[in-house]
Amino acid sequence: MGIFSIFRRGAPETSEPTDVRAMAGEAAQFYGLDDPRFLEFIRGGTGAVTESGATVSVASAMKNTTVLRCVSLISFSIGMLPLRLQRQDDKTPARGHPLFRVLHRKPNPWQTAFEFRSLMQQRALQYGDAFARIVWSRGRVLQLIPLDPARMRITQLPDWTLRYTFTRTDGGTVDLPQREVLHLRNGLSEDGIRGLSAVRQAAEAIGLARQAERAAARLFRNGMIVGGVLKHPGRLSPEAYERLRASMNDDSGAENAHRWKILEEGMDLEPASQSGRDSQGVENRSLQIAEISRAFGGVPRPLLVMDDTSWGSGIDVLGQLFVRYSLNPWFQAWEQAIERDLLGDADVDVYEAKFNAGALLRGSMKDQAEFFSKALGSGGHQPWMGYEEVREVMDLPERADPPPPPPGLTGKDPSDEPS
């Protein structure tokens, strides 16, 4: 392909944002030398050039530990939680439905359910969209094949349906109808078709954090870190200098820490202290952690391994906030995308996909024991759960013989007893 063949005149026909179309390789498309995306492509490849001077792409953003932690935390949470297909009427698992096995255990021959969902969620955070090709057989979903979102183009047809054009590694393209693609998108969107990328939206914050990291790295590479200064009122004699130098070399190392130093000729020892400029650099890096976490749903600082927040009993509340406000929107995105793309017209009113987030919302063992005790009716409370329901919540198998009720507890309403 010639260098000028990457240009194409005319208005773009796809609904994807401009920074997605300016991709390297066969998928790169520009609409003239005056296209501002062409300058961005020449300067920074597929990344966005920020005001801080850093070029932020998905690959470079993942080298920032805050971005890596946010993406991995959300992706692993989505991957590890049970996702099952169940009936809408009685909430029982639909184990007989072929989609149950695909979602719960084996989406394709080389990935587990955890690996597939983690990858899809990771790409949805990085690019705003995640795609998987649906392999159908006689109306049944057999496999879900993940597709690289950087090589996917979307076109909305006159009948409002979508056509997905995927660029293969050999340069060829494949047109896929909407029925053959599972599309997980970020809820934030400019056109309702492509989701907004958290990495691209937070490019300025990520770029500033990268520049702060580079400045700290250059300090350790090129700077001079002084532990203290020996001050002399005049000029140190050569003999005293050699004795002092030999003494300092002999006292170096961890085994000689906190040993006393003998100074000569009226010398003073002045320990080095951190400058205000150094403190400002540390504060700026801490601020960028908070700025980046906001772009990924407000991940609480303790979950980002920040030690400036108490890890006491409030950590349970922060964990619940993470589930409710960071993960719950993604639960809805997954569940509704599955019902839209993987369930037929006959099944969509009978079955539903559901995440079980109970494991992340549970409190301490003491709190759980108190809750279940009251739910079973201890302490004079009206019972609202049975023992088999408690075992189901705790992911325990059913028991063949029900346990006897606690002393003084029959499981009946006291108002039903004769006076």
Image: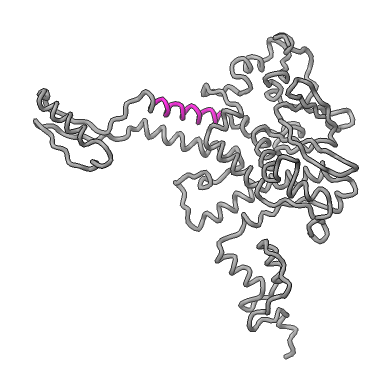
**For residue 377, what is the image quadrant?**
bottom right
Q: Between 299 and 334, which is closer to the camera in this rendering?
A: 334
**Percent x, y of residue 173:** 80, 23
Q: Residue furthest front?
A: 109
**For residue 123, what is the image quadrant?**
top right
Q: Main secondary structure of the magenta part?
A: helix
Q: In this view of the protein, can residue 384 be seen by the observer?
A: no
Give me the residue at 39% from left, 25% from top: 221
Q: In this view of the protein, can residue 277 be seen by the observer?
A: yes
**For residue 133, what is the image quadrant?**
top right
**Percent x, y of residue 328:** 67, 48
Give me the residue at 59% from left, 41% from top: 72
Q: Between 15 and 58, which is closer to the camera in this rendering?
A: 58
Residue stretch in magenta: 204-219
Give me the residue at 64% from left, 17% from top: 41
Q: Is residue 406 left or right of residue 300?
A: right
Q: Is residue 280 magenta?
A: no
Above or below, 87 relative to 208: below
